[in-house]
Image: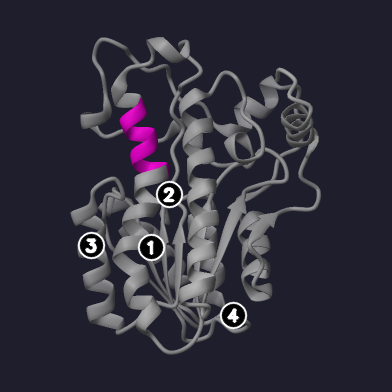
Amino acid sequence: MKDFNGKVAVVTGGASGVGRCLAQQLAADGAKVVITDINAEKLATVAAELNAEGPSGTVEGIASDVTQEDSVKALADQVFAKYGRVDMLFNNAGVGLADMRSPFWDLPMKDWQWGFGVHVMGPVHGIKAFVPRMVEQDGEGVVVNTTSGNGALHSLPNTPIYSSSKAALTSLTEVLYAQLKDKAPHIKVGILFPGPRLVNTGLLDSPRPDEYRDASNPLPKGVAMSDLAERMGGIEMTEPDDVAAYCLECVKKGQFWMLHPESGMDGFEARVSSIRDRANP
């Protein structure tokens, strides 16, 4: 998809971080963008801010909860009713889970339900709600799922839920690519690895709905990624607008693996070697 002018795009997790930047850049290129998040008030504020920048496109906020199938279906119904089509779907919503606070076996089930609800079932709900109608449309379409090197390439041992949910999403996206390539080749698929360095977002301070809180297992106070970078010795960070720009470059190229060429591959290569050599990780 070489030209975004006049295209209709839906971005989940669009109220902040990479999602907000995707919306901003798509609108600047003339797209009609629908951003969605669970916080309706924040969505309205962000949409107003982006529209005030005077892009050639437009940005509209519609609240939805990607963990709930009915909510995502209602979002799709509303978007198709208003715009008549959807050309680009960015399943971008993601959350920090504080899953490094306890061993795997001590983390409450609500943590698992939230992490897999957002990172795996969120994209599943998006695909089921939007893709069948996109397949029936004329012209090219695009689906982009946002994963992480943590899980997709190798797994950090202190983030069991985050890593495993992103690994599942990566596998799911590969299957989606193969099936659409066979059955609907006009719908392209990509998987985005934000990076190449730690991305400066509020992921680790993600607002958690009450239904995913366990009073018997209190959560630590969230931290900004910039604070985490300082704790790690002042490491260099990647800004979300750079991630969004790279993603859209890849969309224009029809690229599946949206993995920045400067991304570290040591962990992935060690994993592949371990598997190939039947060696313990």
Q: Mark 3 highlights which residue?
A: 73
Which numbered disc, 4 or 2, marks the residue that appears first in the sequence? 4
Tell me the residue at 45%/23% (across/down).
98
The answer to whether 20 is drawn above or below residue 206 in the figure is below
Circle 3 SS class: helix
Which numbered disc, 1 or 3, marks the residue that appears first in the sequence? 1
Magenta run includes residue 26? no
Tell me the residue at 47%/86% (across/down).
6
Q: Is residue 87 left or right of residue 177?
A: left
Closer to the camera: disc 3 or disc 2?
3
Q: Amino acid at mark 3?
A: Lys
Which numbered disc, 1 or 4, marks the residue that appears first in the sequence? 4
| Residue 33 image offset from top left, x and y in percent | 42, 72
159 or 15: nearer the eye?
159
Q: Amino acid at mark 2?
A: Ala
- Give the label on residue 93, or none: 2
Residue range corresponding to the magenta coloring: 112-119
Q: Amino acid at mark 1?
A: Ile
Which numbered disc, 3 or 2, marks the residue that appears first in the sequence? 3
